[in-house]
Image (spheres, rainbow, N blue to C red):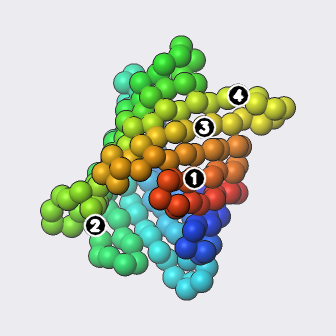
Amino acid sequence: MESSLRFEDSKNLRIHAKQKISLVDSKLHLQGHADLDTVTGAPSCLALIFRSFYPEFSASMGVGLKYERREKFRYTIRGKKAFPITQNGLLSFNVKGRCDFLDQVSKENSKVAAELSWGILNFQRDQDVRIRVGYEVFEKVPYLQVRENNWTLNADLNGRWNVRFDL
């Protein structure tokens, strides 16, 4: 099980847990994840998603159910396609999208982004770094992600940010 501590600009600390169960082969798995809000003591998000990976196309797709505290259960569909720029795949252009819906698809429940991702192995001794610079299409906002081993910082030009520590 993967777990992390997540702190957002809303000043809430959440405990996140994710478990993947391989099905059929290593390219298809069932993924469950949940967030526990430490302020309220209640789950803020629960999800169960079937994820399929297509390494020959540098792509992935997921379909499942998602529950967030503010809303009812929703269906979720997500996909990602990477276009490697370098032979080793450390520099790539990614296109990704997600749509959560109950009865209809709308822009308010969708996210589409294009990003440039650069992985730097051994940035310093035993330290790998990944930098992503992207643009969220529907919100029309650029964003930045810096990941160093277990730490991740996400920020966008609307002033939203979060920090994650993988346990």
The residue most toward the bottom is: 40
- The residue that mark 1 highlights is 154
Q: Earlier in the sequence, mark 1 or mark 2?
A: 2
**On residue 131, which mark appears?**
3
> Mark 1 Cα within 10 Å, few/some/many (few <14, many 20+)?
some
Judge by depth and name the residue closer to the eye, 99 or 24: 99
Q: Amino acid at mark 1?
A: Asn
Residue 4 spot, x, y in % from top left? 63, 60
- The residue that mark 4 highlights is 121
Q: How far is disc 1 from disc 4 in space, using C-alphas? A: 20 Å
* Left or right, 74 with reference to 30: left
Q: Earlier in the sequence, mark 2 or mark 4?
A: 2
- Whether residue 50 is situated above or below residue 69 in the rendered picture: above
Q: How far is disc 1 from disc 3 in space, using C-alphas? A: 10 Å
Q: Tag 3, which secondary structure?
A: strand
* Left or right, 127 with reference to 135: right
Q: How far is disc 4 from disc 3 in space, using C-alphas? A: 11 Å
